[in-house]
Image (cartoon, rainbow, N blue to C red):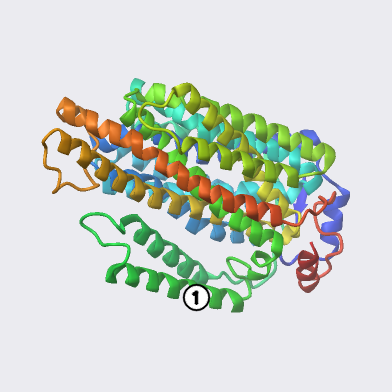
Amino acid sequence: MTTVSGPGAQPAAPAAAAEEPMTHREILVVLSGLLAALFTAMLSSTIVSTALPTIIADLNGNQTQYAWVITTALLANAASTPIWGKFADLFNKKLLVQLGILIFVAGSVLAGLAHNVPVLLGARVIQGIGMGGLTALVVAIIGSIIPPRERGRYSGYMGAVMAVAMSGGPVLGGVIVDALGWRWCFYVCVPIAVVALVLLQRTLHVVTVRKDNVSIDWLGATLITAAVSVLLIWVSFAGKAGYYEWFSVESALYVGVGAVLLVATLIVESKVADPIIPLKIVGERTTALAIIASVAVGIGLFGATTFLGQYFQTARGYSPTVAGLLTIPMVAGTLVSSMLSGQLITRFGKWKGFLIGGAVLQMVGFGLLGTVDHLTSLTLISVYIAIVGLGTGMLMQNLVLAVQNTVSVRNIGAASSSVAFFRTFGGAIGVSVLGSILAARVATISADGLARLGIDASSGSADTGLDLAAMPAPVAEVIQHAYGDATGTLFVVAAAFAVVTLIAVVLIPNRALRTTIDLVEESSPADHADAASRG
């Protein structure tokens, strides 16, 4: 159907790809399988958000473990994304995406069978590795078969699927928890993944031309995974009772080891022939700014919205189903803005205005959510999260589009996955840091409330259990109010990062979208680097 250029492709390959583009119908057929796979991966990230209060209570977990159920999957996702992305530039993308689905299915089954939190966390790591593959490969394949100018409309479809999965997942999760139990939040992803596997086998036909003697940067992959892991462990436990303070010997040790590993990663990546994260591409202005924006988007989006389900259930006392339904305004906002912006970008070829508009809307939405407490009107909250959804729909896929417009097909996997990596990395940081902030604020507010009841909470910690039904009614009410009043702080932090997103997208060069799949002037790897620098 379409030949996708690999590292060893001849100079004529990009031109050939441009001369024989796929038809709209052919692209839609391929997208059916790709988007089904992407939907499955994204759904697994969000469907558990509504179920988490029930899961943690059932498995006798605490607030730290609550955050880590999300963080472990995001960490594995982030750490594996650049590896999958590099593989996409070297090996057959179809086989890779199918492997990603199989790994994801294995993790989902194990998560559903988990009998304690540690087993669940291990299963989430496996899920995250599969999710990293699906996220990176779907974007890479789309970038390999569609020119940037036409990619807007298809990115809109992709954004819509991501919107439904990310924002609709809590709704589905709530219904499943109430009707079938939380374990089915993991099992439900399996049949969808199998359908995606069958669709891809039937519809996706991508030929990858690869060079001989391919070298894989295993050392770089190991170093970057270790660096990310160490830093996330640090931000997850710093400042919490029973662990260590932000400014302590332990913190200094974690930060020092993480910094050394990052420096070692940069040294290795600058010397190897096929780096996991090509520094020349990442250092290009558009990509660098898109990465900064993606980190900030990830911190705000994953970090802040992860705790919405907990707010609706713990602070407001709603069932998982109702808590999921209360996130529908975000679904609608993201869906509408993603589809509409994609169509308008394809029609007019203008994309930067949507990035700026999305960043402004996200900043305003998070700022408004920063005012919520345990008594805030649900109508107001619905409006606020709808604004966040509108901004998110304009940002996520259009940041990837801006980057893909500056690189050739042979590097599109690495470039796209680099953006996805840093967005997910930001999300993992956001969940960990904001989870720590929430736990600390809840501990402080609840201690004051319990003191008014004549209860000594001086020996308590932020890692108290979340099973409110097992608490005396007055104590449960204090904890509920504490979670409601503390949640607003998370969105204030998210709004601050949205400001960073806005600054980054304003500075991204406003380059016209090319109408060819590849950079037509490319004739060699050296020429490609020059072309990418010129944008």
Q: Is residue 99 visible?
A: no
Q: Is residue 21 visible?
A: yes
Which residue does the image show at 35% across and 41% down from the upper left? Answer: 111
Kind of element beneath mark 1 = helix
Quadrant in the picture for the C terminus: bottom right
Q: Nearer the viewer, residue 81 or 419?
A: 419
Q: Nearer the viewer, residue 16 or 346?
A: 346
Which residue does the image show at 60% across and 79% down from the upper left? Answer: 271
Which residue does the image show at 63% across and 42% down from the upper left? Answer: 360
Kind of residue at badge 1: Val
Q: Nearer the viewer, residue 83 or 209?
A: 83
Looking at the picture, how far across and down is residue 179, in whole percent? 35, 20
Looking at the picture, how far across and down is residue 167, in whole percent? 52, 32
Q: Is residue 223 above or below residue 79?
A: below
Instruction: Name the residue tied to disc 1.
Output: 263
Q: Nearer the viewer, residue 268 or 22?
A: 268
Looking at the picture, how far across and down is residue 100, in whole percent? 52, 48
* In-image side of 443 versus 387 (left or right): left
- Number of labels in the image equals 1
Quadrant in the picture for the N terminus: top right
Q: Is residue 164 above or below residue 423?
A: above
* In-image side of 214 versus 228 (left or right): right
**Crowd tier of the residue under label 1, counting other residues whose Cα lies within 10 Å: few below 14, some 14–19, many 20 or above:** some
* In-image side of 53 versus 189 (left or right): left
